Image (tube, coloured by chain):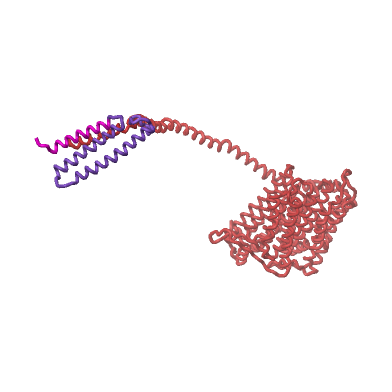
Chain colours: A purple, B red
Amino acid sequence: MTLGLTHFLVLSTLLFCLGLFAMLTRRNAVAILMGVELMLNAANINLVAFNKYVAPGALNGQVFALVVITLAACEAGVGLALVMSAYRNLETVHVDEINVMKW
Amino acid sequence: MRELAWLIPVFPLLAFGLIVAFGQRLPGRGAYVAIAGIVLAALISIGIFVEGLGGAGAHELNVRWVPYGQAALDLGLRVDHLTTVMLLVVTVVGSAIFVYSVGYMHDDPRYSRFFAYLSLFAASMLLLVLANNLLFLYAGWELVGLCSYLLIGFYFEKPSAARAAMKAFVTTRVGDFFMFLGILLIFFALGTFRFEEIFAKVHAGALQGVTVGGLPLLTVAAVLLFGGAIGKSAQVPLHTWLPDAMEGPTPVSALIHAATMVAAGVYMVARTYPLFFGSPGHEALTVVAWIGAITALMAATIAVVQDDIKRVLAYSTISQLGYMMLGLGMLGYAAGIFHLMTHAFFKALLFLGAGSVIHAMHTNDIKAMGGLARVMPATYWTFLIGTLALAGVPPFAGFWSKDEILLEAFHHHRGLYAIGLAAAFLTAFYMFRVIFYTFTGTTRSPHAHPHESPAVMTRPLWVLAAFSAGIGLVGAPFFGNPFHDYLHFEGIEAPAFDVRLAALKVVVVGAGIAAAAAVYHWRVVSAGALRRAAGPLVTLVANKYYFDEFYAVAVVRPTLAVGRALRTFDVYVIDLIVNLFGFAGLGLARLYRVFDLYVVDGVVNLLGWIARTAGGVLRYVQTGRAQNYLLAIALGVIVLLAAGLFR
């Protein structure tokens, strides 16, 4: 059995759904951030896979994946800083308890 | 000097404003301010008069006020020879009376207000005199009427004074109505209010042959204008207000109801003389002459039976005003004004003398006086001079002016001459009756303690007495009658002085004095016997020819009846209609209220309810949890995807 584009796409779909599921169901903000990471990486798999199978000569997909990884790092940094700040101020990282904005 | 003419009314007006604003705090409680105002006006007037003597012609100051199509309403002053004479009379007599009032009114609680009114009057009168158009003259005319009203009713606590003020105001208003019609008639016929233009157009024959209602327009307009003079100058049949006007303080009677305001009617006729003169066949002047003559005789007869010293003088004033009208009506333009001038001086003097007597005796009744010549010599001598001037004894002022009027009458209408002569006889008679009752014999009220009035009152008397004695000489034929030359009306030749007529007049006047002396001094015939002998005639005269009663029946009562009828109509018909509308409105309003409550409010409330309910339902969507929103987004994407796939 040769490895084809479909396999990659299925994997990335599964990974995306897992990430989405984590985002929708977890109460812990750190877990939600992890869900976001999963979803970003699912997108990365897509980008690389399409690059390899659809336009092997071009480098766009791979470069784009690198940009996404960079962004993901930034996002994780900012997100974790927010979580830290929230924990310090509210002594919780559970998103349903962080409701000072809902008045 | 004539350029300063506009200042003449301004000074008294300024005094009026100051006294109204500051009143008691001014020097002399306002009196000195008022006197300063009138004296300054007098000084300018004298200056202008002297200039007029020097031969200066007419001077006009005209300001366009309201342009009105091709016509315009103007504000303006006119200074000509007639004006200068009037200015002199008003300001000089006014000054004397203002000074006199300081003494006469000194313990009056409304002292300042009195001087404020006097100043306002002086300003209005001077405005009237200086006006260069009919409208402006009319404004001054009504203003002096207002001042007259205020000053007659000065003692407004007295019901009689309040009534007299009302009577004067309403009666003169009747005349003013006709005058206003006359002014409008002239305006619509000639398109201007300015005297100069009116006279020029009349002179050019602009109204020749123009008729209104079958009569020549010029005659109608002149007679309508004369209607105003009848009211203001208390001519028959609108004379009834003047005797009642004596309710006012005596200086007021002297200034307004003898010397100046009542003469405004005469002045107005003289001012608009070209209209009267131009009416075909001098018809308008004939009317003036007859009214004047009737007034002169009738008022003189009434004066004979009056016992109130001021009322005698009031009727005398009416009579003399009639004389002036007679003079004007008999083409004696200068004669009428001459008599106006001399009369202003001696009648003011007589009134002030009467005021001095009243001040001393605290009564107006001449039968309660007597023997005052000894205690009040200054008053007596000045009063006597005034009386001689009024009676027409040479060489006092009244002789010359009256003689001229009678001379004119003699040359134009013998009947009117006879009436004038009879009035002259009566004038001498009733004035000496007053003299004998008041100043000779012994006092008839034992409790009175008469005393001479203070100098502030007697000095003006002497000033006026000097004028009364001497001013007539300006019209004396021996000096070439300079007054006539000064006040010449183009187109009239004055008849030459006639010694025989003058002598006849002196005889008549002497007879009047002798008759008065016979009855009231030597008592050859007792007054009571005379009264009984004349019988019904005395009753008629004593009741003033029943004019008041006639007006009460013919005018006042019908007016009141109409008023009451109209009130009834108002209450039962107009009010009924108004109330019906009110009820209809109320019923409609109730209906609208129901509609409002159930329809308009219902819709409004429904909208509110919908908004609230929708909000209540939809707010459950707004959870505030980002995860819920994210879920919704994810589901939305899935739905969109599905829709895209299974299209």
Along the line of sight, which residue is nearer the eye, B297 or B73?
Answer: B73
Residue B416 in view in this figure: no
Along the line of sight, which residue is nearer the eye, A65 or B276?
Answer: A65
Residue A19 forms part of the magenta stretch: yes
Q: In this view, does B382 lie above or below B593?
A: below
Residue B72 forms part of the magenta stretch: no
Residue B18: where, in percent of width, then height? 69, 52
Name which residue lies at 79% across and 63% down.
B472
Viewed as shown, does residue B458 lie left or right of B318? right
Q: Quadrant of the N terminus of chain B?
A: bottom right
Task: Name the magenta segment's main secondary structure.
Answer: helix
Along the line of sight, which residue is nearer the eye, B87 or B13?
Answer: B13
Residue B196: where, in percent of width, then height? 63, 64
Residue B379 location, quadrant: bottom right
Q: In this view, does B455 lie above or below B550?
A: below
Viewed as shown, does residue B81 lie left or right of B352? left
Q: Quadrant of the C terminus of chain B?
A: top left
Residue B4: where, in percent of width, then height? 68, 63
Give the mark count: 0
Viewed as shown, does residue B539 lie left or right of B210? right
Q: What stretch is highlighted in magenta?
A: A1-24
Residue A90 location, quadrant: top left
Residue B60: where, in percent of width, then height? 64, 65
Residue B486 in view in this figure: yes
Residue B222 location, quadrant: bottom right
